[in-house]
Each structure stands twice: as structure tokens, then as C-alpha cells.
Amino acid sequence: MLDHHIEFKFDGVSEVSVPWGVGVLKVVASGQDVNVTHAQLSRVVGQAGFIKKSSRSITVVVVSDDPAFLAVFAEWSFKGHLQVWSTRFLVLTRLPLKCLLHLRSTLAKTNSMLIIINHEPSPKCSVFVELPYSSGDSQPQTVAWWTPSRGLAPTFLLPLFPDKFYRLAMGPRLLVAHVPNSVFKTKVVHDPDAPGGRRVVILSPVATLLETVSEAMNFTYDYVTPADRAWGVEQPDGSWTGMTGMSVREEVDISLGLFTITAARAKVVDFTFPVDIMNNRMIVGRGKPEVNPWSFLQPLDVSPVRTWWVWERVLLGVWMLTTVVLTRSYTGNLVSLLAVRYIPMPIQSLRDVVDNPITFLVQKGSSQADTIQTAESGVFRDINNLQKEGRFQTFDASEVTKNLDVKVRRGDHTLIHVDDVTKMMMAQDFSVTGKCDFYLAREEFLTAMGAMAGPKDSPLINAVSRRIITVREAGIYDHWTNSYTPNMTTCLNPPTTMAVRSSISLSNIWGTLVVYVAGLAISFHVFCFELIYSHLREYGNIRKIHRYIKDAKVLPQSYGNMGLGPKHDGLQYDFATGMLHRRTYRKTVIAEREMFILLWLIGLSFRKIAKRMRTSATTVRRTSSGDEVPRSHQIVLGPHTPW
């Protein structure tokens, strides 16, 4: 019922008010052109659709004795999407059943009842229900009668507006679209009702779900495969391919498989309740074991959690106190790691596919392929551009296992599929070979809900959805998925290392040699730099002394007596006092160095330590007071220099 006032206005029909949830829409057919009647009927159906959108549920009562009008109304109600299960239809007419054969298909697939009024020999109304998938020679089911004396008298065979699709009384044989997938095995069972007396059974969780639903709803089915063996994508002319196209054209009743629910598909087909939430992942072949020349650094990779500087210093202090133990431990770990081979797993994301010389495989006619091929930006566009390099390929659903066994195992191809299917592929390969030759990339993408599909506004899909909800809530489908394939989780986390028994060769330790040679080269360059720097600095000091002596007009003989030649040794000019000092150096003792380290560990910086101890923290430094040059060798620079 409507909870607000609605008004309609359109040409040919007067204004109609709906104050109490009742709308009356009238089309005058007598004396008018057929095209005018069609135009008015289309507008009436459009207004009825507006009422349907504004209400929780509606009941459409059609009153007519014109077979042509009833046929046209059935056509336009289908185009206007009025024929949904939530809408109740009540057709009231005085025509006999033999004149309403063209309405039987519409009445069978809608939530409707047919009321036939008969005045002979006495006024009487018969209420009929057309069961779905009835044969042509069958009669509608009578659910009630009405007479002026007795009123409405039900037959109790079926209720008024029965749920005809909850359990199909006629036990029909339906057509189910299916694309064979080499991942799922099949078997042939005896079925006398099937063509040839045999029926194909698919061993997959989704097929098992459909089998359970068919038993509960009392129907059987046969598989039909589309010519292109695709799931279905939209073509430039608006048509659809694959199983989706068969559902659009109503060639099948159900399309089997976990269809990715997309906006484009939802416009042309109906989906059941989501069976699963799917993630797409890449399956890649594992490489051969390789030697890691930098394994000598792994014993030092403890990956500590960084907190405060104090804790790092405490950790360093403990490490210094246990140097011997760590050295022994490093030696043992190094020997063991040199005997380990590492299995590379470079492909972990879609970006890795673009950056590495590897070919991308995707099933043709799938939503994944359509998303990648129509992408205008991002990594999907980069993946699609790989077609120019021949690194983007599509394959048929029946070639999944072949591509996995030949191309992906080789290591130069990667295959994208639904997460559950990739796990089944790895489990089946492990059951045959006993080895984990593949791994799953860490990145998950194109997450979407998966469901079965059917024709638009099909009541069968709504009935199947209710059964699927029951199976999902009970957790039965998850149990089928996890237990259907043995060894399902064996190869999900394959080891990345492999221990071998072999002698240590140059390939195991060349990383250590590289570090050693690089250290020697750096040390040699630093040593040469120190030599050059010390000579340049000494030469600069001598030039300054020579310049000051020249300005003070020092006698050459006095200058020579001072020993200030190009190769003087141990003299330093003090510009503050104008005096020369002889430089003397000494080494720090072990106790001083240990004191510096202890003060640094408790949190003091080197600058604070040097300030408090009045000495530098370097290993070799100048004494606090150098020995002065004898008085006879002193030079005081200034305007009056004494000699």
C-alpha cells in the first residue's frame, strides 16, 4: 500500500489520484487506431512501473475481454519490468481458457492468478493458477471458486498466489549453460531421462551446489556449452557473448559458474545470492635453487625493533660483552648457510609482471580479461600494453591445466585466476608430482562477489537464491571448497630455501671476497688521501711562516739557524702569541679508551666526553702543552721584532 498521495498526468488519460494506495489506469481501445492503443498502453505500463518503485509491493489487476489487449499488455509489462516476482498479477476476464493460450507462458512465470467469470447457468468465478514449466496439454490448477451464495471456496490444493518456484511441481528438465574447465574433473553417470541415457557430472563445489539445489527444488538439467566457450563480455553493438549472452537471449534457464557481479552484467541478467567473495591472484612457477653469495650477512640480520637510543646502546654493550659467543655462533651459522640454496620468487604483484620479462595469461571472455583490456589508466593499462611486446595472451577455459603444466611451470609465464581455483590447481599438481612447483603472488586484486546468473526478471533465480542462502548460512559450501581437493593447503606457503650436500666453491663465497677487496680499495684510497692532505697542510703552514718571517724582516742567517727549511720537522707557529712551538704527540692508553666507551654507552656524546675530560676521544692526539722552542729560536712578529 502507498503511504503518500501520488498523481499521474499523461496525454489520453485523465488525471488519476491515488490517495489510499489504489491507482486506476484506463486505456480506451474501441474506436481507436491500434498504434494509438499501443502508445497509450506503453505509457500506462510506465506509470505502473513508477507505482512499483514507490511501493514495497503492488498488485496489478488487469480487466479485459479482448485477447489482443491481454497479449499486448503481457508484452509491454515484460518490457517495463513489471513481471517480477514481487508484483502480483490478477487477470479478470470472461474469456474461456481456450482463448487464453497465448497468456499461459506469462501466467506461468509470474506471481499471478487468472479469474474467469461465467454467468451460465448461474454467476460463478473460477480462480486458476498456471504452474511453471507445464506441458501444452495440461490445464491450469484450480485454487478456488466464488459464488454469490457460498462466497470464496478454496480447493486447498494450492493457496492463493502460491510460491510456485519454491518447489517445482512439474519436475521440469532445465538447460544450464556451462563452460568446461580443465581444472574440474568430470564423470559420466547413468540417467535414463538424459539424452543417450548418460549424464555428465562436474566435480566442483559450484556444480555440487547446483545439484543440491536441483534436488531441493525438484528439477533436473542438461548442460549446454556456448560456441565461443566464454563467460561473456559486451560487444560494441550491445550484444553479449558466451554464457551471459545465452542468458540474455533466454536460451538457458541458469548459467553455472561464479560470475563476477559487474554493473554491466547486472543490467542484462539477474544474479543469485552471492555464493562467494572472490579474489584474483597470480600463480607463478617456482625457480630453480640458486646460491646466494651474500648469505654471510644473514647471521647478522636479527631485525631488532627500534625503540630508543638508550636501548640500542645497551644492546651494543651486551653484544660487546658476548663477542666471543657471537663469533662462534656466526661461524656455525655461516657454514650452515653456505650449504643452503635459495628459490627465487620475484613475481609478487602486477607491477612485477610489467617490470620483469614474463608473459601474462588470462582466460578469454572473462571479466578479468575485459577489465584489463578496457582499462584506461593504472597498472591494468600497463598490463594491456604488454600485447605490443607479445607478453599478454588469452586462453580457453579447457586449456587451463595445459598452460599451467607447460608454460607456467617453465617460469616465463604467469596465470591469473580466482583464488580458490589457483589453490585447486596447485593441489592437483602436488597430488600428481609430489612437489610444490608453483607459488601464489602476495597481491590480491579485482575482489568481487561471485554468483550464478539467469535471464532478467526470472523467478527461478529468486527461488535458487533462497536455497543458496540456506547452504551458505549452514557453512556447507565452505566445507565443500576446503575438502573437495586433497592437499589444498600443502603448497600455500612453500619453503624458500633448500639444504644441499656439496663442497663450498667460489660461487658460495665470492660475495665475501667482493667485500674484502672493496674494503682494501677504500682503505688504500683513504690512506693516499691522508698522505696528500698532510703534505699539503704542512706545505701551507711553511708558506705562512715564510711570509710572516719575510714581513718581520728576519735575517737570513737567523732564519737558517731556526731550522725552518722546506723540510722542517716538529714546529708549529702560534698566531695568537707569535711564537713557534715544537709539536709532541703521544698515544692514548687502554684505560682511557675503555672510559670513553663506557661514558658513551651511558648516553654521553663524544663532544660532552671531550669537554668534561679536557681531552679528545681520538686514539692519537697532541699534548695539552707542547714543548716550546728555545728562546734563541723564538720569533715574535710585529713592528718591533726583537732578536
Image (cartoon, rainbow, N blue to C red):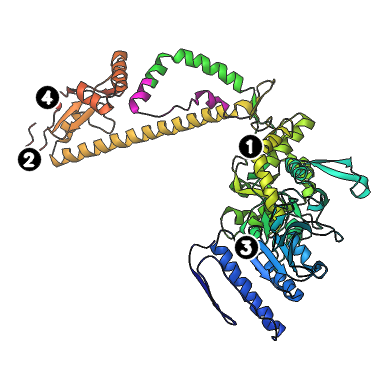
- According to the image, label 1 marks what residue? 345
Tell me which corner region of the image, top left, top right, bottom left or bottom right, holds residue 307. Answer: top left
Q: Closer to the N terminus: mark 3 or mark 1?
A: 3
CA distance for labels 2 and 1: 80 Å
The residue carrying mark 4 is 631
Viewer-side residue, 280 vs 51:
51
Circle 3 is placed at which residue position?
59
Amino acid at circle 4: Arg
Q: Residue at x 66, y 55 (%)?
A: 386
Residue type, mark 2 in image: Pro
Whether label 4 touches label 2, CB < 8 Å: no
**Vertical placement of residue 474 versus 6, above or below:** above
Would you place residue 585 above or below residue 88 in this image?
above
What element does badge 2 sit on? loop
Using the image as rendered, state which of residue 343 and residue 533 is in the foreground.
343
Residue 606 appears at what percent x and percent y? Answer: 28, 26
Give the residue number, with chain letter if any, for mark 2: 639
Label 4, secondary structure: give it: helix
Give the residues in magenta: 292-314
3 or 4: tag closer to the N-terminus = 3
Q: Residue 18's spot in the image, x, y percent?
A: 52, 70
Tell me how far mark 3 sits from mark 1, CA to CA: 62 Å
